[in-house]
Amino acid sequence: MSNVNKVLDCLTTNGSMTQIELRKCTGFSPTYMSHLLKDMEKNGLIIKREETIDNPNNKGGKTVTNRISLISQVDNIESTQQNQDTVDDDNYLDDDINNADNSLDTQSQQQQLNLNQNELTNLHLKVDLLEKRVSQLEEQLEIRKDLAPNTQAYKDQKLQEQTEMVYNVLDDTIFKSAKELAQLTTIKIHDIRKILKKLKNIGKIEANYPQWNNPNKAYRRT
């Protein structure tokens, strides 16, 4: 039940009430109760009316207090008083007043229903967005797990990328040394030597010197 509906339910059940009585009925704080009643009064849902009551503890013997009522309750009271002062042939006015009361009640209920439906729609949209975000984060987490620096999958992928980079720098005419390849690719020299050895073993490159440890050794594509 929304906060507005709680106030409406208290007034419908108990009739006109003071702000203190409404706070006890709804459980709201004084500040929030005051703001909520101001909004409801602006929206035409309630009305505040001064009422003087006997109070022997007060110096004047009287206390003026504000009582809060539903618009429909006030209209019903005024309608009853008017009926007592009019002749029987004016009874048709009662129907118009009752119809107006019913219209106000219906409009208030429809407004609250529309408000609840909008809130529910917005809530569904938020849930959908959160579910999509969670799904994205889960996918990213799985990718990061696979590509974490301390995993074998990450090391294998990095080696594959570096191997392709070295092979693309080489061509089938000009020999290039390991040092030149390290400068061109920014890959560490000891990693370059491992990659060159791998490419030579699978027959994708050739060396200009057969000795593996020759300092002048250079490579090209086969």
Image (spheres, rainbow, N blue to C red):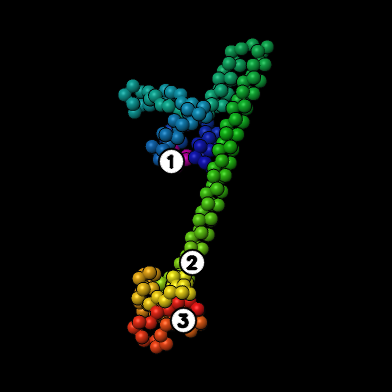
How far from the left and from the top, in percent, is residue 50? 43, 23
Pair 3/1: label in front:
3
* Mark 2, residue position: 143
Q: Nearer the viewer, residue 154 or 194?
A: 194
Distance of label 3 from label 1 (alpha carbons): 85 Å
Magenta span covers which residues? Answer: 23-28
How far from the left and from the top, in percent, is residue 93? 64, 16
* Mark 1, residue position: 28
* Mark 3, residue position: 206
Q: Disc 3 or 2, which lies upstream in sequence?
A: 2
Q: Is residue 155 visible?
A: no
Residue 151 located within the stretch drawn in magenta: no
- Residue, x 34% and y 28% (percent of image)? 57
Q: Nearer the viewer, residue 192 or 37?
A: 192
Distance of label 3 from label 2 (alpha carbons): 37 Å
Q: Tell me if residue 25 comes above or below residue 181 in the rendering.
A: above
The amino acid type found where label 1 is placed reads Phe
Q: Disc 1 or 2, which lies upstream in sequence?
A: 1
User: What is the chief secondary structure element of the magenta stretch?
Assistant: helix
